[in-house]
Image: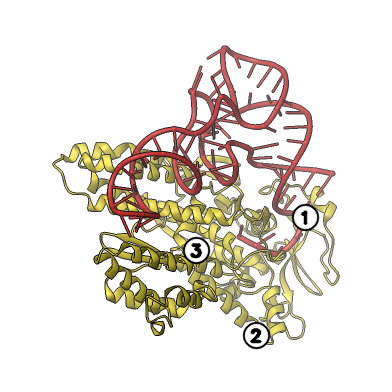
Amino acid sequence: MSLRLYNSRTRTIEPFAPLEGNTVRVYVCGLTPSAQAHLGHARSFMFFDVLRRYFVHLGYRVDFVRNVTDIDDRSIAEGRERDVPWHVVVDEYFATFKRSMDRLHVIDPDREPRATQYIAEILAMIEALIEKEHAYVVGDGVYFSVPSFPRYGALSGRNTDELLIGARIAPGEEKRDPLDFALWKFAKPGEPAWPSPWGDGRPGWHIECSAMCHALLGEPFDIHGGGYDLIFPHHENEIAQTESLVPPPMANVWMHGGLLQFDGKKMSKSLGNFEPLYDVLDRNDPQAIRLLFLQTGYRKPMNLMEESLAGATTGLRRLQSAYDALRKAPTVPHDEGAERAALEPFEMRFFAALDDDMNTSGAVSVLFDLAAESESLAAAGAASHAAAFLHQAMSLLGISPAERTVHERSLTQDTRTIGSLAYTIRRSGAEHLGGDALERLRRLLGEIIPPHAIAAPDAIDAIVEARIKAKSEKDFALADRLRHALSEAGVTLSDSKDGTTWTVDD
RNA sequence: GGCGACGUAGCCAAGUGGUAAGGCGGAGCUCUGCAAAAGCUCUAUUCCCCAGUUCGAAUCUGGGCGUCGCCUCCA
């Protein structure tokens, strides 16, 4: 088996092979940082991150470009509202986005070009389009002439007659045909502008991607990706611009990720019906979000629900604890050949699933099967191989088998851990205790713990220690009272042979 | 209105001609001072409905019904 991918351009699943040598050149349409990134962006970029990791696994060299469209009408408008320069707006949203990508373990692209860094290349492309009469200059800017490109609509499966039905020319636009779109917009007073042969202004949406693809990868390149909503008009327009100047196809394979919906509706800037990604990551384990996304095929629309996120967290813990168990499994006599044989079915199924148009859902199911079999694998002496494979597989999916993130605030008897945890709670988690939780703790525990000890989050530590003492003295009635008291306050205790851990309930 | 997806257990979801993966949830058991965690077992005679093709269909064809997306900024 080898990798097969669905190609939006041909509407079929095709065997994948790089166009040139061993290098896979990928361009993914990145963020337009004119609003907060949301989970839909996370889903899309995370998928292409997994694709990239898989290419590397398969032995390809990957040149992965993900652009930033750092100039658009919306950021200009917001800058004006807030009375700050437009690029301040862009930088803020972009910085937040990058932090979120880090938390999601999305590897930085090899190159992350910004539209405003490629103004010269954009102008050169527009100039060439004008020269070949695919573009024309009018009073408010330079437009691409859609009638000059007969194949227009091929990618999105539309014809220009259908498109014309709903098309209108907005007031102030001087384009000749309703389907024509702006390559360069002349600046109105107070708007950001770069000089051009036709008048100061800024690039229209679409041309920046054509220009950066051409400058950084060259046509044809292997894969052009993005969200499903980019097929029309964005990618259609990119194709029209680029293929008016170079022989088709602009890109060999076009890949589009299904959109994430929230509450049965798509998330969008105009609807504003989403929670910023950054906030979602504060409330949930980023790796659980990854796992959740991977359990649905990348091309399918996906409806997100809060309960699903909680479920994914549970699933993630299972995989991680299976990994822990495999690593700690005592070594038993075994032979290398048998060990490999035991793992082979899992490996084959896992990679066959990924080969099948990145069926991550199928691949993840193999990992759960492996987790379920981990005891018998360990008994057969295959623990170390199983652990190694689980590590490899999870890493391919961008999920760390070991890392427990933010939300699991727990501690052991180790006082250093207690100290750092108390600090964490004090810094960011006190509100998790609920408004009157400390008051309730005082009331419930006043007779057991000196009231002055219940003044801060450190109180939890004091209670935990008191309970450990009670347990060591076999005073289980008191130990239970303490457990229940903390439970009332929203703190759950867990005993294990390594000590007592606690978590703050959400 | 035009175009395109999709409809699988309580929820999420894979599977696209050979007799229903997996996750969450739920139930039972093991372990445990208690409570968890973890492990084990069970949890769809059936894939929106109807008709057809076939030895055989969740998978193909036709017709319904329903949901969503694109056609305007969008990952």
Tell me the amino acid under the disc marked 3.
Answer: Asn
> Compared to A355, does A135 lie above or below?
below
Q: Which mark is residue A207?
A: none
Is circle 3 on the same chain as circle 2? yes
**C-alpha gap between disc 3 and disc 2:** 33 Å
Q: Residue at x 39, y 44 (%)?
A: A368
> Is disc 1 surrounded by few (<14), some (14 to 19) or many (20+) residues within 10 Å?
some
Q: Of the residues shown, which amino acid type is indicated by label 2?
A: Pro
What is the x, y in percent for residue A288?
46, 57
- Colour-to-chain, yellow: A
Location of mark 2 (residue): A85
Q: Is residue A175 left or right of residue A318?
A: right
Which numbered mark, 2 or 1, is in the foreground of this view?
2
Residue lying at the far left in this picture: please name it: A333
Which label was assigned to residue A147?
A: 1
Q: Mark 3 — on which chain does it sit?
A: A
Q: State which tag comes first along the sequence, 3 or 2.
A: 2
The residue closer to the viewer here, A148 or A152, is A152
